[in-house]
Image: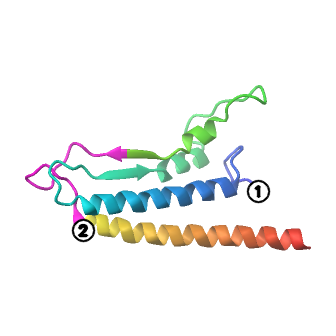
Amino acid sequence: MKMQGATSIETYDVLKTALNVSSTRANLISTNIANVNTDNYKAKRIEFETNLKTALDGTGFKLKSTHPKHLNIQSEILQPVITENKQTSVKENGNNVDLDTEMVDQATNGLYYQALTAQMNGRLKMMNYVTSQ
């Protein structure tokens, strides 16, 4: 099964990548919270959903593959990117970790992870049903 708008990206692979991103995001949030009082520490984020939306909407660039051995640019677009905001500072010590923001991000990521696992379970149940018939 293919996701609508994606040319060669399997739904399962996108879900698997999204679950890995959610896990990485949870680790980054934990690291940010652990460093809330560390001098000059800058909060880190992971960007994925924007790239996924761009790929699925077709608003990003598309390359035409003229040979089966050409690289699939879609998979390169969907790679998560870890960013660090070096411009802001919440505290006088140069640290920019906002504990309230981190807690909201943690709750949001938990809901995101639950939704992804529900989707993955649904896909696996559907495959199991089809293969058992």
Which part of the image, by quadrant, shows the N terminus?
A: bottom right
Residue 57 tag number: none
Amino acid at pointer 2: Asp
**How has the structure been colored for display?**
rainbow
- Furthest toward the left, the residue is 92
Query: Residue at label 1?
Result: 1
Q: Is residue 13 above or below residue 109?
A: above
Q: In which quarter of the image is residue 91?
A: bottom left
| Residue 120, position as x, y percentages in the image | 65, 67
User: Is 49 placed left or right of 15 in the picture?
Assistant: left
The tally of labels here is 2
At mark 1, the secondary structure is loop
Point out the stretch of residues depicted in magenta. Answer: 83-99
At horizontal 75% and vertical 29% (from top left) the residue drawn is: 69
| Residue 16, position as x, y percentages in the image | 61, 57
Could you classify mark 2 by the number of other residues whose Cα lies within 10 Å: few (under 14), some (14-19), or many (20 or more)? few
Q: In this view, does 17 lie above or below 58?
A: below
Could you classify mark 1 by the number of other residues whose Cα lies within 10 Å: few (under 14), some (14-19), or many (20 or more)? few
Q: Is residue 22 located in the magenta-colored stretch of the structure?
A: no
User: Is 79 placed left or right of 85 in the picture?
Assistant: right
| Residue 71, position as x, y percentages in the image | 67, 31
At horizontal 69% and vertical 72% (from top left) the residue drawn is: 122
Between the C-alphas of marks 2 and 1, the distance is 40 Å
User: Is 11 placed left or right of 110 in the picture?
Assistant: right
Along the polypeptide, which appears first: circle 2 or circle 1? 1
Amino acid at pointer 1: Met
Query: Residue at label 2?
Result: 100
